[in-house]
Image (cartoon, coloured by chain):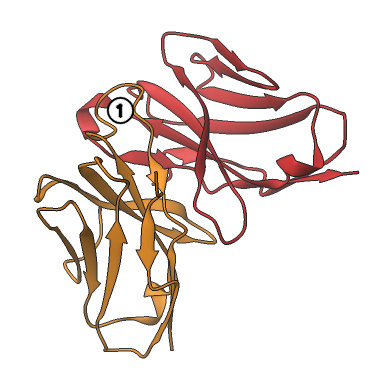
């Protein structure tokens, strides 16, 4: 049972344009949502997070939006840069699950120069 | 500060064998988690250790086990390997665990296990 879903396995965007990565979830008890970025041959690195009581969090070029009623979150990257090309994982945390993060299957972003 | 170190980087085993993977967390981090990454499933939580105790466990069979030492280093063991165990195994550390709000996980580069 995939509680966190990233339905787009890949996305290609022109440099300078906006990249929008989407994530849907089914568990309304999630308290926190996170995005991780992964380059080949490296481990995932934390990018940005949002609490379930917020609807937006911004950090430089990265903004995460949360729509609780739709159980949907998205990561916006503006402007996109070639160095942003990586696999992006959406993850969620529920307080009652202790130290477990539930990850999506990832979206591979390619930013074309 | 050195990052999370996982050894070995690559492993090739045959079905039925067992394997042990090692993880050294960031200095001062006491929580170590293990995740399995496969192409179709993303990252799936295996287990988490804190101060040598397993605090949380994912939905994996008993063939998957782990332990943590007093210096916070952790090992993961898979016995009676199956073809489906081929995956990237990632270790992550944090000071006290994700259960503390705003605490991030720091991942190692992983061990790529191939079971033939």
Give left or right: position of B103 versus B64: right
Question: Which residue is rendered at x = 29% and y = 40% of the image?
Answer: A100
* Colour of chain B as rendered: orange
- Using the image as rendered, state which of residue B14 and residue B100 is in the foreground: B100
Give left or right: position of A40 versus B81: right
Tell me where residue A5 appears, x and y as whole percent: 52, 40
Q: How many marks?
A: 1
Tell which subunit mark 1 falls on.
A
- Using the image as rendered, state which of residue A37 and residue A66 is in the foreground: A37
Q: Crowdedness of circle 1 by 10 Å Cα count: few (<14), some, many (20+)?
A: some
Tell me where residue A43 appears, x and y as whole percent: 49, 52
- Using the image as rendered, state which of residue A71 and residue A82 is in the foreground: A82
Tell me where residue A55 appears, x and y as whole percent: 53, 10
Tell me where residue A52 appears, x and y as whole percent: 42, 15
Q: Is residue A84 above or below residue B17?
A: above
In red, which chain?
A
Which residue is disc 1 drawn over? Answer: A94
- The quarter of the rendered structure image containing the N terminus of chain B is top left
Rendered image quadrant of residue A17? top right
Question: Which residue is rendered at x = 39% and y = 23% of the image?
Answer: A32
Question: Which residue is rendered at x = 37% and y = 63% of the image?
Answer: B6
Q: Is residue A92 above or below residue B88?
A: above
Task: Name the element at disc 1.
Answer: loop
Rendered image quadrant of residue A47? top right
Question: Which residue is rendered at x = 54% and y = 17% of the image?
Answer: A66
């Amino acid at each position: 049972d995939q509680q966190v879903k990233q339905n787009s396995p890949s996305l290609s965007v022109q440099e300078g344009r906006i990249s929008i990565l989407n994530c849907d979830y089914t568990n309304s008890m999630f308290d926190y949502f996170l995005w991780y970025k992964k380059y080949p041959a490296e481990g995932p690195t934390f990018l940005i997070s949002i609490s379930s009581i917020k609807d937006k969090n911004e950090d430089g070029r990265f903004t995460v939006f949360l729509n609780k009623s739709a159980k949907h979150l998205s990561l916006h990257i503006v402007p996109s840069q070639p160095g942003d090309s990586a696999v992006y994982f959406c993850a969620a945390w529920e307080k009652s699950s202790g130290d477990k993060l539930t990850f999506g299957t990832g979206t591979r972003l390619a930013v074309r120069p | 500060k050195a990052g999370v170190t996982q050894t070995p980087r690559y492993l090739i085993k045959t079905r039925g064998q067992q394997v042990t993977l090692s993880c050294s967390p960031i200095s001062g981090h006491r929580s170590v988690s293990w995740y399995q990454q496969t192409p179709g499933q993303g990252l799936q939580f295996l287990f988490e250790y804190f101060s040598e105790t397993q605090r949380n466990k994912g939905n994996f069979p008993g063939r998957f086990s782990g332990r943590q030492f007093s210096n916070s280093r952790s090992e993961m063991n898979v016995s009676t390997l199956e073809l489906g165990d081929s995956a990237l195994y990632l270790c992550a550390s944090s000071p006290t665990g994700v259960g503390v709000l705003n605490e991030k996980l720091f991942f190692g580069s992983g061990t790529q296990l191939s079971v033939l």
